[in-house]
Amino acid sequence: MASTVVTDQVTLTVNGQSVTVPKGTLILDAAKKIGIDIPIFCSHPKMAPVAVCRMCLVEVEKMPKLQPACAVYVADGMVVRTTTEQVQKYQKGVLEFLLINHPLDCPICDKGGECPLQDQTYQYGPGASRFDFEKAHFDKAVPLSDKIVLDRERCILCWRCTRFSEEISGERELALIQRGVHTIIGTFNDEPAQSNYQGNWTEICPVGALTSREYRFISRPWDLDRTASICPGCSMGCNIQVDARHNRIGRFQSRENLAVDDGWLCDFGRYSFPTFQRQGFEAPRVRQDGKLVEVSFEEAIAAAADGLAQARGAVAGWASPAATNEELFLFQRLFRQRLQSPHIDHRAFRPTWPDPDPDDMTLPIADLERCDYVVVLGGQEVIDAAPVLHLRLFKSERRGVKVLKIDAEQGARAREWVPADAQAVGILATVSHKKEATDLQAALGKKVKGSVRRLLVVRGPNGRGANDLGILPNFRPGYEGLNGQSGKGRAEWGKGGIGAAYIFEASPLHAFEATEDERRWLSGLKTLVMHRFRASPLDDLAHVIIPGRAFTEKAGTVTNMEGRVQRIGRAIDADAVPDDWMVLQAIARKLGAPWDYHESSDITADLLDLIPQYAAVDRGERVLWSERT
Amino acid sequence: MPLRPDTVAKIQDYARRYPSAQSAILPALWAVQYEQGYVTDEALAEVATHLKLPPSLIEATSSFYSMFLTRPEGRHEVMICVNAPCMLRGADAIVAYAEQRLGIRDGQTTSDGAITLRSTIECLGACGGAPMMQVDHRFEENLTPDRINAIFDHLRTAPAFHEQPPAEKKPARRTPTVSGEITRSGPSGARARTRKASK
Ligand code: SF4
Ligand code: SF4
Ligand code: FES
């Protein structure tokens, strides 16, 4: 008997080229694998096929009619043709239909220049329309929310935005209202959309129907300078592209990293960019006879070094969890080696903080999908702290992962809920509920067979880096103890023994945020140095104010909550303002340090010597502390 | 105007009948329209709450179907089919007669508020009894001017569909036969089936 080999692979030909793909692959993807592009509008790799636009029709031998490549699965021996005369005729036809009521206002459309409808009309469409009747008219410039504006005439009803709302964010805010030629995209009763993920609609809309109000009429896409970077919004570390025009930020766009953001951004992060927009040159200031007077950077740095040196041994240092690893590395060296003051911190005020440790991030973000049970300890609080996590959780749920969202105090319920035969359990919590998370982890560790891992959402795009690099009173970089040499933490600074403070507020989104009590002791200091990008509420207490750079104006690395070290890029020139690390170096040099860095990448090299785990930065991987030897 | 408790109870009952609450949207919308005569945004929102579905989905569904009214109309709805089979059997004349009789045109309501006329309706699936019209939720087939007169006279005084006692809602008063033809529509006119042998 002849044996047949059963495989999960099928072989077909596309335009005469043979290709082998797994069963269940769409014709569209099989063609893409051998570099054959089939034009699409409605199809999207992260959404289920609907085949409503008919742009992707191809010829399949033995099938009587053209077939939508985005919805037909491959079969063994299939013969597909994508460029025949018939296909071309249909492509022209589909585009002519799509354009019948399209306003063709490309010259005033924000999408013009990066618009699939425009591009594909050039490539596959008819040169002219035969439709010389009056076009159907719909509402234009409809404010869908405070973030998005909708042009109903430009919409080609591809359902991508409604499917995003249903399949990706699960909020189901957008819907197709009415039917036939009257169909429009809208929200219930025209209420403003509430979603925190609306910016993604503008990126997936294949025409200029959904656009960002912040980016309205800002730039032509070909005029944008694009810089790869990381979102400054939170510790998720979503990858972004900073699009700038005339040295001003135009928008943040997503830059897909499947391990982190899965291609999406939240609106909090995406539309945070005006916060980082520079408002003109600001001179450094030094307090003389009670009044702040403008000085040069040189003078301000000298005054800062002077004031700090006088309080040597008793200087408190706070660095924002939005500063880069390079800056933080210098910061802790300045304090520990030059100022003999290990009193450094990066945290928001809280009377007691649990100690951070590498185990806070044993669960990588992408592994949420591979858990069978996930407990979100704190529910919405966790989502608010890192909004794109919601999209990953919702995706996981759709794939069968059981997700329980409960208050941080309800750990007992989660203990019941997770069954003993669970294979992989994940616990998500914010760092302020670390204790509850570790307790639950310990309890579940005893109960279940499989693994129980946790991921803590920290504060700031580099909150994890600040922990790793020892911007803490009781840990050196790499979570090394200090053998009794611990300094005072933020909660103790007000209790006496501190003579000066250096507050490095790198991002307005992750500022010092002084409590009333803190303001009181800060106002009693002999020297307060404020090194910050934007005016701070503490400026009026400061003796030295050194303007710093925005997140978008510097290069370096930041570490996201799961320990992934990623590079941020300098998208905006701010040459009149010294880079934040240069200010730190200049102060240290005044105090006798022999540092001589010329680029932030020189610092990265030194940092890697001290913490070899950070070599992961060159591989885009997570820092694997647990594999430390 | 919030929905009446009995309507709410009906909607909740519909929701329980299906594996997915989404399937209960159409019956729920009917319940609303039966009670209030038309469907307001407020009622859509209420349906969404009872079915635990996003309101956008309820609006998407109700706006897709033309039979859900968005403003108050006549107590009775008369829809005359003008699709091919009815047209071939004289629908145009029927429309003209109805319009003249009621003194209104497509989409309008008689001044006494009794009847809303729709005379551009596509196939309602009762071609076997063409020409036909649908009155509220009942088919009237093999129309003649006399039949139309009788129906309209009845409607002038009859209560709205949702206010009728249950017995009256039964469809199909028998339609008179057209001379020389065998009517095969409606329950009583259906072609007799060969009996299945019992056992
Ligand atoms: S608004 Fe854009 S994404 Fe939504 S259906 Fe219309 S064309 Fe598609
Ligand atoms: S989740 Fe955080 S990192 Fe991601 S886009 Fe939102 S604010 Fe930015
Ligand atoms: S891309 Fe295939 S039908 Fe729209």
Image (cartoon, helix red, strand yellow):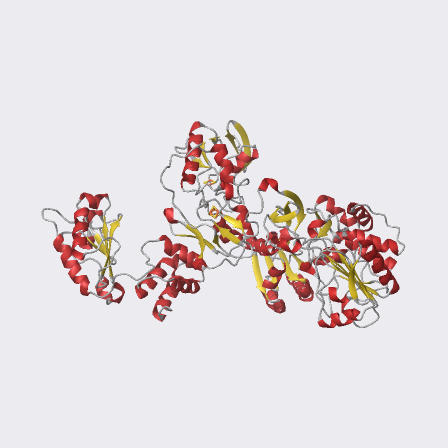
Left or right of A263 on screen, residue A287: right
Number of labelled discs?
0
Q: Can you tell which quarter of the image residue A359 is in?
A: bottom right
Q: Which residue is at the front of the view, A582 or A15? A: A582
Residue A554 lies, in percent from the top left, at 72, 49
The residue located at (89%, 50%) in the rendering is A594
The residue located at (52%, 59%) in the rendering is A194
Residue A494 lies, in percent from the top left, at 78, 71
Q: Which residue is at the front of the view, A275 or B118? A: A275
User: In the displayed structure, would residue A391 be above or below residue A379?
Assistant: above
Residue A497 lies, in percent from the top left, at 84, 70
Instruction: State whether residue B161 appears in this view.
Output: yes
Q: Check the image and name the residue furthest to the right.
A: A592
The N terminus of chain B lies in which quarter of the figure? bottom left
Q: Which residue is at the front of the view, B95 or A369? A: B95
Q: Check the image and name the residue furthest to the left.
A: B179
Instruction: State whether residue A457 appears in this view.
Output: no
Q: Which residue is at the front of the view, B21 or A598? A: A598
Q: Can you tell which quarter of the image residue A68 is in?
A: top left
Q: Can you tell which quarter of the image residue B152 is in?
A: bottom left
Left or right of A34 on screen, residue A519: right
Residue A151 lies, in percent from the top left, at 47, 49
